[in-house]
Image: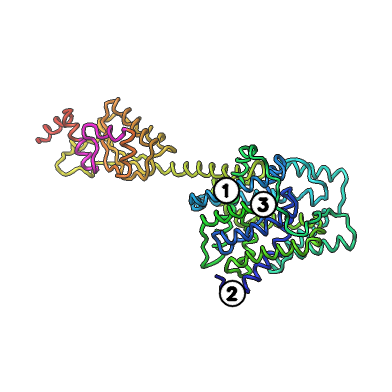
């Protein structure tokens, strides 16, 4: 499959170097320990590469997933996280079988931007306790935990950990801009670890890793507890699907000839999340940052992602004693730099300035991500975006009074034309007639001034739902009760079913008042006026 295996092997090695400190850090942040992060990177990274829908995707533990897992650990313990991982894997496979991947295209850009900004803020705040060198306070709200950590540090400040974290974060950010091809995250973590040994610094340790991969965990919850975990599992599955498909889209955009299969990607992520808990891992998803590194370093096939997993497995087996000496403050610095890098200022500024609605959606999604829950934040963003979009679409619906006299032929005298214009009024409906705006302009129609006939020109109606059809029916009823006859013209074939099912079409057809064209509707209105004797006097005076 690979056109140049050497490039894929080199790309996989580079991604592994970048992923190592992130896997350790996200494992610690999740509450299950660094070994859980490594197990996830190895197992999920390999299986998602084999079964996923992208040739370039790199999967493993991510900051966004960590944000979701922290409250689960706080409420259910490690067994809850492992059980949630299994359930989320099953849900992802079900989504793949239902071919739900294509719906990712409907997520608006402001929701994605706000979601990413909120995640970056949460990841940064999660590192505050380790960066300050204080025990992680209890709680599942990141703002509360961060505040308690700051209070703890203020009571007895020790500056070793903060200085180390800031130095690592600064080196990663500055070095990454200076030499983007160098793995500054691993270099700075290694330097910080050596400094801790050499100067016997009082920095927190991540604890000893096992000599090999963690043994399969037996800490799953009892089956009776599964119903209470369905909601968290749904949140994890939704996040895994969202982040993975976003990452695959980003990877496609960075290449010329690569296109991912969204449904197969969901299936691959489902398999990965089913297997990772069996090895003590946490729920996983594709990682945008690692995928971007993979593409930039020349990866062309799945071999690169597989190489990344193999290298990390070798680290677990061969270098666990060395990895166990990495200070937590150094990992916190790497993740702080990761959070900063996630924020694309230019993209945020462009989205916020696009329209007021886009800016509102972005800010609302980011705040909800920070204050509530990631999945709730996306749902809130989608609901608000949908509501604003419907409002914008509804504003395009118009009810315009139009002049029908150009449709009259030369056989009508001036006096008859004047009488027709006095007793007949024509309206053209433009745009969608649906629940978001139908009542607004159809109410205007029902309150039309006293005339004998109203002609509705409906050929420009773009869409119509049951609410719009019922509103139209109600408007016609109101006009009929006032003695005003309604004629319609140009009803489109695709709208007939909804009009017929609501009874609106039957009402429009009453006494043959539904016509194919406007001239025919005008002729019908003229016959109605003749039947009422309104045109007789005009004909006598004109000698007709």
Drawn side of residue 455 relative to residue 462, left or right: left
Instruction: Point out which mark residue 71 bears.
Output: none
Q: Compute the Cα span from label 3 to label 1.
A: 14 Å
Rendering coords of residue 50 (x, y %): 58, 61
SS label for mark 2: loop
Segment colored magenta:
503-525
Mark 1 surroundings: few (<14), some (14-19) or many (≥20) residues within 10 A: many
> Which residue in the protein does label 2 denote?
4
Q: Compute the Cα span from label 3 to label 2.
A: 34 Å
Rendering coords of residue 4 (x, y %): 59, 74
Is residue 519 a member of the stretch shown in magenta?
yes
Q: Observer-nearest residue: 523 or 90?
A: 90
Instruction: Classify 40 as above or below 375.
Output: below
> Which residue in the protein does label 3 denote?
278
Which residue: 57% across, 48% down? 90
Q: State the count of labels.
A: 3
Is tag 3's residue or tag 2's residue first in the polypeptide sequence? Answer: 2
> Which residue in the protein does label 1 denote?
90
Q: Compute the Cα span from label 1 to label 2.
A: 35 Å
SS label for mark 3: helix
């Amino acid at each position: 499959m690979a056109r140049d295996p050497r490039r894929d092997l080199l790309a996989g090695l580079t991604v592994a170097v970048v992923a190592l400190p992130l896997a350790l850090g996200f494992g610690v942040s999740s509450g299950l320990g660094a070994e859980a992060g490594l197990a996830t990177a190895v197992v999920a990274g390999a299986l998602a590469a084999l079964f996923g829908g992208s040739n370039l995707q790199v999967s493993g533990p991510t900051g966004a997933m960590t944000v979701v897992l922290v409250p689960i650990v706080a409420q259910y313990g490690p067994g809850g996280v492992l059980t949630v991982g299994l359930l989320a894997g099953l849900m992802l496979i079900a989504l793949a079988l239902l071919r739900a991947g294509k719906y990712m295209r409907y997520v608006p850009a402001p929701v994605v931007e706000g979601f990413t900004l909120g995640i970056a803020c949460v990841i940064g705040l999660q590192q505050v306790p380790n960066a300050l060198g204080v025990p992680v306070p209890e709680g599942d709200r990141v703002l509360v935990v961060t505040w308690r950590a700051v209070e703890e540090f203020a009571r007895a400040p020790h500056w070793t950990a903060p200085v180390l974290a800031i130095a690592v974060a600064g080196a990663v950010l500055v070095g990454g801009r200076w030499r983007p091809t160098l793995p500054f995250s691993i270099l700075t973590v290694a330097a910080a670890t050596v400094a801790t040994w050499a100067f016997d610094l009082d920095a927190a340790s991540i604890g000893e890793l096992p000599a090999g991969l963690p043994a399969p965990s037996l800490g799953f919850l009892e089956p009776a507890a599964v119903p209470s975990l369905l909601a968290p599992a749904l949140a994890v599955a939704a996040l895994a699907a969202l982040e993975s498909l976003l990452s695959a889209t980003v990877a496609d955009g960075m290449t010329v000839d690569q296109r991912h299969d969204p449904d197969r990607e969901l299936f691959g992520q489902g398999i990965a999340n089913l297997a990772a808990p069996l090895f003590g891992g946490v729920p996983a998803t594709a990682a945008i940052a690692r995928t971007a590194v993979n593409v930039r370093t020349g990866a062309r096939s799945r071999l690169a992602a597989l190489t990344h997993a193999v290298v990390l497995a070798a680290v677990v087996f061969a270098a666990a004693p060395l990895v166990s000496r990495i200070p937590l403050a150094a990992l916190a610095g790497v993740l702080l730099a990761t959070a900063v890098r996630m924020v694309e200022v230019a993209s945020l500024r462009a989205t916020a300035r696009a329209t007021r609605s886009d800016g509102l959606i972005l800010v609302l999604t980011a705040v909800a991500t920070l204050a509530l829950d990631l999945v709730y934040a996306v749902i809130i963003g989608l609901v608000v975006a949908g509501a604003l979009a419907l409002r914008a679409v509804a504003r395009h619906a118009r009810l315009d009074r139009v002049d029908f006299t150009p449709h009259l032929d030369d056989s009508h005298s001036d006096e008859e034309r004047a009488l027709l214009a006095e007793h007949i009024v024509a309206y053209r409906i433009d745009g969608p007639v649906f629940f978001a705006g139908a009542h607004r302009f159809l109410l205007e129609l029902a309150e039309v001034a006293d005339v004998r006939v109203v002609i509705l020109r409906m050929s420009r109606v773009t869409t119509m739902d049951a609410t719009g059809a019922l509103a139209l029916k109600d408007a016609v009823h109101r006009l009929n009760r006032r003695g005003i006859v309604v004629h319609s013209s140009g009803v489109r074939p695709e709208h007939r079913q909804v009009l017929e099912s609501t009874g609106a079409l039957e009402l429009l057809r009453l006494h043959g008042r539904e016509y194919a064209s406007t001239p025919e509707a005008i002729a019908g209105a003229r016959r109605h006026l003749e039947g009422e004797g309104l045109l007789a006097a005009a004909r006598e005076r004109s000698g007709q």
